[in-house]
Amino acid sequence: MEGFNKISWAERHMKVLENIREEMEKDRPLEGLRIGMALHVEAKTAVLVKTLISAGAEIAITACNPMSTQDDISEALRSIGVKCFARRGMSVDEYYKAIRKVADFKPDIVIDDGADLIFELHKRGQRIRGASEETTTGVLRLKAMEREGVLLFPVIAVNDALTKFLFDNRYGTGQSTIDGIMRATNMLLAGKKVVVAGYGWCGRGIAMRCKGMGANVIVTEVDEIRALEALMDGFEVMPMSKACEIGEIFITATGNRDVIREEHMRKMKDGVILANAGHFNVEVSVSTLEKMAKSVKEIRSNIKEYDLGGKKLYLLADGRLVNLVAGDGHPIEVMDMSFSNQALAVRYIAENWKELDNRVYRLPEELDRKVARLKLKTLGIEIDKLTEEQIHYISDWRCGT
Amino acid sequence: MEGFNKISWAERHMKVLENIREEMEKDRPLEGLRIGMALHVEAKTAVLVKTLISAGAEIAITACNPMSTQDDISEALRSIGVKCFARRGMSVDEYYKAIRKVADFKPDIVIDDGADLIFELHKRGQRIRGASEETTTGVLRLKAMEREGVLLFPVIAVNDALTKFLFDNRYGTGQSTIDGIMRATNMLLAGKKVVVAGYGWCGRGIAMRCKGMGANVIVTEVDEIRALEALMDGFEVMPMSKACEIGEIFITATGNRDVIREEHMRKMKDGVILANAGHFNVEVSVSTLEKMAKSVKEIRSNIKEYDLGGKKLYLLADGRLVNLVAGDGHPIEVMDMSFSNQALAVRYIAENWKELDNRVYRLPEELDRKVARLKLKTLGIEIDKLTEEQIHYISDWRCGT
Amino acid sequence: MEGFNKISWAERHMKVLENIREEMEKDRPLEGLRIGMALHVEAKTAVLVKTLISAGAEIAITACNPMSTQDDISEALRSIGVKCFARRGMSVDEYYKAIRKVADFKPDIVIDDGADLIFELHKRGQRIRGASEETTTGVLRLKAMEREGVLLFPVIAVNDALTKFLFDNRYGTGQSTIDGIMRATNMLLAGKKVVVAGYGWCGRGIAMRCKGMGANVIVTEVDEIRALEALMDGFEVMPMSKACEIGEIFITATGNRDVIREEHMRKMKDGVILANAGHFNVEVSVSTLEKMAKSVKEIRSNIKEYDLGGKKLYLLADGRLVNLVAGDGHPIEVMDMSFSNQALAVRYIAENWKELDNRVYRLPEELDRKVARLKLKTLGIEIDKLTEEQIHYISDWRCGT
Amino acid sequence: MEGFNKISWAERHMKVLENIREEMEKDRPLEGLRIGMALHVEAKTAVLVKTLISAGAEIAITACNPMSTQDDISEALRSIGVKCFARRGMSVDEYYKAIRKVADFKPDIVIDDGADLIFELHKRGQRIRGASEETTTGVLRLKAMEREGVLLFPVIAVNDALTKFLFDNRYGTGQSTIDGIMRATNMLLAGKKVVVAGYGWCGRGIAMRCKGMGANVIVTEVDEIRALEALMDGFEVMPMSKACEIGEIFITATGNRDVIREEHMRKMKDGVILANAGHFNVEVSVSTLEKMAKSVKEIRSNIKEYDLGGKKLYLLADGRLVNLVAGDGHPIEVMDMSFSNQALAVRYIAENWKELDNRVYRLPEELDRKVARLKLKTLGIEIDKLTEEQIHYISDWRCGT
C-alpha cells in the first residue's frame, strides 16, 4: 500500500527517532496515556505516531491545516488502529469538527502545530497534563495566553528547541518551500526577482535557498536588526510598498496577517506568483484578492489565477503552506530532529507534569542536546571534545594577554 | 482538460517563442512541410509544436525517452490533429516502433533529442532536408557520423547555440535535477555528500544548485581542465573509486556509460541514492545493478530498492533522466530559449537546405543572438551599447598604456 | 599627516557614530569624566575617542594587543591631547605597563577589549563607575568573575548587543580575516582546504567568507548544535585530529587555548598556514611550535617559518589576531556599529551607574535598536511598519486557522 | 633581503613552474637566446625570470604598467644579473623609454602583457622569432593587427590557453581585485551595492567574489548573451546609465575605454568608490574626472578624492589595475599556471619558430593540458580515466536508447 511505502521510506531516514523509539520501547513511558495530535498528516508524522504507540500511548490525530493531509497516510494510520480524523481538502468547518473530535478523545497530553487544538481545549476548560507545540506561530499565541494568565496547563515550546528551529524552520522550510513552488509552477528560479517577506528563521532559510537557486532576492522586514542582517547577507531590503512593484515571485513567512494586501496587489506586475510559507493562510490577503478579482480559475493543480482586469496574479496552494500543499512538506531528516524533540517533550511531560506550572517551557537543554548528539552519531560524524586544560581556561578569568 | 491547462501555463512563460511564432504566423515559412519530432512530450514541447503548426507545418511526434512522456499532453496534441505516438512507460520495443512511425511519416525536416530518430532515418537511407539536434549526447553522435562521412543530410546542432547550452544545460538541468530528486525522495539536501559525475555544462549546473541547497559536493571528471575548474569553484575533486565510498547521493551527467559500475557499487554505503541526469540510461550500470541484487522492489514512486545483501541502494527513475521522469523537466523559461532556437533552426533549414552540405552546423550566430535579445526584451532588461569611440578603441591596436 | 588622513577616511564611513556624536556634543553627558580605554589603536578607534571627547570626556588609551597598534594613529591621538600609551610591537611587559598607566589615570569609566584592563583594576581593588567590554572572550571572563562574586563594578557586555555580535563578529571578522590572510600570503583561496576551528559568530563569518572566495571549508567544533549547523550550511565537520591531516590553511576562532596543539602539528602537511582570529594568541600553541621547531625565521612580513624537520609550518602574525596584525582590522562600517554601542554604553553608565549592581549587563535593548535604526537611516534604507491590525493579530491568541 | 624573501615565498607555491624548470634545466632549450619581457615586475614574475634563466636565456625586463612594479623585486632581479628597467611610479614617458630599452636589447623572443612592447617592435620594424602575450586586451590588439596583415612575427596568445584564462582571469582577478579594494579602503563589502562593468572572464570572477563577500552585485554588459548569464547567475543587470545612480563601488573589467564617463559620474552618489581591474587605465575616464573636479587630493594611500562640488568621488590606484597597484597582484598559485604557459610558449617558439607564420596562435592544446595535469599532480589530486568501453561508447554513434 502506497501509504505504508511512504512511511517506511520516511522511517529509513529518521534515525534519531529510531534511537528514541528503541529507548521508549524498553521503558514504555507513555503506557496507558492518551495522546491527542494535530499535525500535518503525512509520512513523517506517521513515524512519530508509531514511536508514541511503541512507548505505550493510544493516539487520536487530526490535521493542523485543511489542505496538508495525505489521504494514503490517513488510511495507513487508521489501519493500524489510530483514530485519524484528517482528510485532504476539508472545509474550515470540517477542520474544526475534527479538532473537536480529538478533544473529545480526552487526551492526557497533546501535540499541536499552530495551537488550534490547545485553544479548543481552553475554550472547553479541559485541563490536561500538558501539551507541546511545534510552530513559531503557535508559540507566539501560547506566550500571549501565558502573559494574560489564561493558560490551563503547561506547554513545551518544542519550536524553541535549538535542534528544532535552527534546522526545521531554516533548512526545512528553505528547501521545502522551493520544492513546493517548483512543483506547482515548473518555473525557473535563476534570475527571478523573489520577494521574501520576513527574515526570521523560516524567511532566512527561504531567502538562502532562493539565492542558492540563482534568484535575486529582496527581503522585507519590520525588525530593524533582521533587516540589517538581510542586507549584509547580500539581499536587497526595502518596504513591501516598493518591493511589490519589482517582484516576480512573493513568498511570505512572517507569522503575521495581510503582509501582502490590496495596496500591494494593486501595484504588482502582471503574472506575479504569490506563495505563503507561514503557518496560517492570512499572510497573503486571500479574501481581498477574491474581492478584487473579476474572475478566478484554477489553471493548474495548486495554481489559481486571479484576473484583476489588465493583469493576472497567481496564487499557489490557496495561500496555505506551499511546501505542504504543493509538496511533501519538510525533508525527512529535518523532521527526524523536530519529531525527536516532540517525542522527548511528550515523555518529559508524562514524567514531570506534576512539577510543571501552567506556563510555556523550553524543552530542557539536555534533551535538546541529546537530539543533536544522536543526529551526529547517526550521521557517523565525530566532533572535538574540550581537554581538561581548555575547560579550565574558559572558566578562568585570570588568563589574559 | 489538464493537458491544455499545462500547455497554456507554459505558453504564458514562453515569451521568446511567442515573438517567433508571431513572425512565423505572418511568413508561414513551413507551409506544406512535414516535421518529424522526437522530444520529451510534455507541456513546453507542445508549445513548440503549436508554433511550428502556426508556421504552416504538419507534425508527427514521438518521445525521445520511454519514461518522459506526460500522457495528458499526448492526448491534448492528438486532439489538435498532431500525430503523436508517445506514451509514458513504453517498452524499448514500443519506443523504437514509435520512432519508426515518425520516420514513416516522411518528414521533410526532423527535430531530434538524442539522435535516435536521425539514426533510424540513416538506417533506412532516408534523406531529408535537414535535422536539428537538441542534446550534447546527440551532437557527439552526429559529429562522429560526420567524421566517418556517413551523414545523409545537414544537421543543426541546436545544442551548441550559446543561448541553448549556456542556459538549458546549466541552469535548466541544474534546477530540474534538484527538483526531480526532491520530489522522488523528500530528502534533505543540506549537509548531504552529493557526488556529481561530470563537470560539463549539465554537471556544473547540478553541482552549483546542490551547493546552493547546502549540499557538500564532490565532483568526478576525466578532463583535467574541468577537474581544476571544479576544484576552484570550491568542490572536492576525486576519482569515482574514492567518491563512491563517501557519497550519499550520486548524480551522473557525463554523456558516457558505466560511470557508476560494479566496482563502485560494491564500495558504496548502505542507503545510497543513485540518479542520472544524462540523456541515456547507461550512466549508472542498471543492468549490473540488477545482476548484483538479491531482490528489487519499487518502494516509492520513482524509487527502486536494490538489496545487495548487507546494504541497499536506491535507484531513481530507473536510471533515466531524473528531471523528466520524476519531475516536469526543465523550467519553462529555459525551454523557451532552447525551443526558440529549435524553431529558428527549422526555419533556417527550410529556407537554406539547398546550400547546406551533409555536415553538422552550428546555428548561425545572428539567430543565436536574436534569441538572447528577445529574451532580454521580454524580460524588460536593457543593456549597454558600445559608443562610436569604444567601437573604434577595441579595433584599434595602436592604443596602449 | 597619514594618521589624520586615515582617521578622516574612517570618519566618512562612520555615520551612525556621527549621529551619536552630534547628540553628545549637545548634551555633554561625559563632562568632566575620565575614560580609560584598552582597544586596538587604529583609525576607527580614534573616531570613537574623538566622539567621547566631544561628549566632554578626558581620555587615556592603550592597546589591547601588543601587535595591533598603528603608530601613526597613536601619534595623531597624542597630538590632540589624548594620553596614548600604545606602540606597535610592545613586549608583553611593556604591554602590561601601559595597561597600568591607564589604570593610574584614575578613570571613571573604562572601555575594554579582552578585559585585561578591567582585570588590572580588580587586582588593585580600584572601583570605578563601570566598564564596557567589546569581545566574546572578555565577556566570558567577566561572567566567570560575576559568578564567583568578585566583580567590583558593573560592566556592560557590549559584545552581546545584537548590533554588535551579529555584525562585527560575523561580517567584520569574516571579511577582515580573509583580508589579513590574503595580504600576508598572496595565496589563492579558491580550491584550498581551509579548516576553521570554532563555529561561533566569528567562526561562521570566516567560514562563510572562505566559501565565498571558493575555498573548501572544514569546520571543527566542540558544540554538537553548532557542529550540525556547520554541516547543514554545507561545510565538512570533523574533529581537529582528522582535519589536521587534510587542511592547507587553518584559522582558529574559538576563544579557547591550544586548539591547534602538538598532536595536530605533528600530523600536518608540509607548507601549512596557521592563522588565528580569536582574541588571544593561545589558540595555536605557539610555544609548542617553538619548542618543536629546528629553526624559525621570518620569511615575509607577518609570516614565520617553523622548520620541523621534514616539513615546514607557516605561522601568520605570531598567532595573534591576523586581521589586525596583518591587515587594518574590521571594516569601518562594522566598527561604526560596534563603537556606537560603546559610546551609548559609556553614556548609559555615566547616567545610570548609581542604579547598577556589580554585574554583567546587556546594553538596554532600546539602545541596541537605536543603533540599528540609525544604521538603516544613514544607509537610506526604509523597512516596513506593522499596521494596527497586525499588532493586534500577533498579540491575539484567539486567531486560528 | 625583502625582495628575495618574497621571491622564495612565491617559489614555494609555484610547483608547476618548478616541474617545468626541472625539465628546462636539463634540456636548456633557450641556450643563447635573449628574452625581452614586459610584465608586472613582482615576485611571481621573478620566478618566471629565474625559470627562463635556468633554461639558458639572457633576460631584459621592464614593467607593463607604470604603477605595478615592486622595487624590491627589481633590485633582486638586478642583483642576479637581469637587465631590469622597471621602477614603481614611472611617468608615462619613462615607462615607454624603459620599453624601448628592452627593444634595444635585441630580444629573440618577447613576453608581453598588454602588447606595448610588441607594438614598439612593430614601430621599429624589428622582427624577432616570436612573442607571447598574457592578456585579453593584448590579444585583442594583436588579432586586429593580424586581420590588417601587419604582424611581423608569430605570437602565442597565452591568454587564450584554457589553463590561463579560465583560472587567472577568473579566480585570479576575482580574488586580487577584492584584495586590492579592501586594502585600499578598509570598507565593508557585505551589503554594498557593487557595480561590475563587464561579464567576461575577469568580470565574472570579480562579480562572483563580491557576491561571496556579501555584496549585492549589479552587472553591466554590452553583450546580450553575457548579460543573460549574469542575470541567471543571480545578479541584477542594467545599463550603466541606471547603475551609476545606485552603485556604491564600481569596478570596471571590460577591456574598453570610457566605460564610466562624465554622464555617469554626474549621476553618481556622494562617496562612491571607483576602481579598475582592466589592463589599461582608460576604463574609468580619469581625464574627465580631473576636468570635472574642483579639487583633487590623495586622502589615503591609493585613494584620490575628487571633489565635484556637492559630492566627492574616490578613485583607487589612479584608475590603474587596482589588484596590482593596491595589492600584490594575482594569487601565486594562479600565476603558477599562467607563467607555466608562458614558459612553455617561449620554449615552443624557440623550437618551432621556423614553422610558424606571422599569425596569432593558441598555445598547442597538449601544452595547455600538460599545465593542467601538472597542476593536479602537484596538488595530489587524481581524476578518473576513461575505460576502453567508454572510449568506444563516445565515439560510436550507433549506441542509442
Image (cartoon, coloured by chain):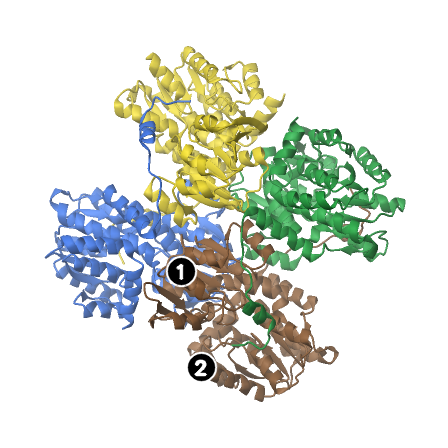
Chain colours: A brown, B blue, C green, D yellow
Taking the view exactly as shown, the residue that stands out farthest to the front is C26
Q: Position of D5 compared to D103: left or right?
A: right
Q: Do the residues marked 2 and 1 share a common chain?
A: yes
Whether pointer 2 and pointer 1 mark residues with C-beta atoms closer than 8 Å, the reply is no
Q: Chain of mark 2?
A: A
Q: Nearer the viewer, residue A356 or C40?
A: C40
Secondary structure state at the residue bearing disc 2? loop
Instruction: Give above or below for C19 relative to B52.
Output: above
Q: Chain of mark 1?
A: A
Q: At which x and y percent is residue C378?
A: 58, 46
Q: Residue at x 41, y 40 (%)?
A: B225
Q: Residues within 10 Å of mark 1 (few under 14, many from 20)?
A: many
Instruction: Give above or below for A115 relative to B332.
Output: below
Instruction: Give above or below for D13 relative to A176.
Output: above
- State the residue position of label 1: A268
On the question of residue A140 being in view, the answer is yes
| Quarter occupied by residue B383 | top left
Q: Nearer the viewer, residue A30 or D267?
A: D267
Q: At which x and y percent is residue B86?
A: 23, 66
Q: At which x and y percent is residue A333?
A: 53, 65
Q: Residues within 10 Å of mark 2 (few under 14, many from 20)?
A: few
On the question of residue B314 being in view, the answer is no
Secondary structure state at the residue bearing disc 1? loop
Instruction: Give above or below for D381 relative to B217.
Output: above
- State the residue position of label 2: A91
Image quarter of the N terminus of chain A: bottom left
Numbered label tally: 2
Q: At which x and y percent is residue B20?
A: 22, 53
Q: Nearer the viewer, residue A5 or B392?
A: B392
Q: Nearer the viewer, residue D115 or C295?
A: D115
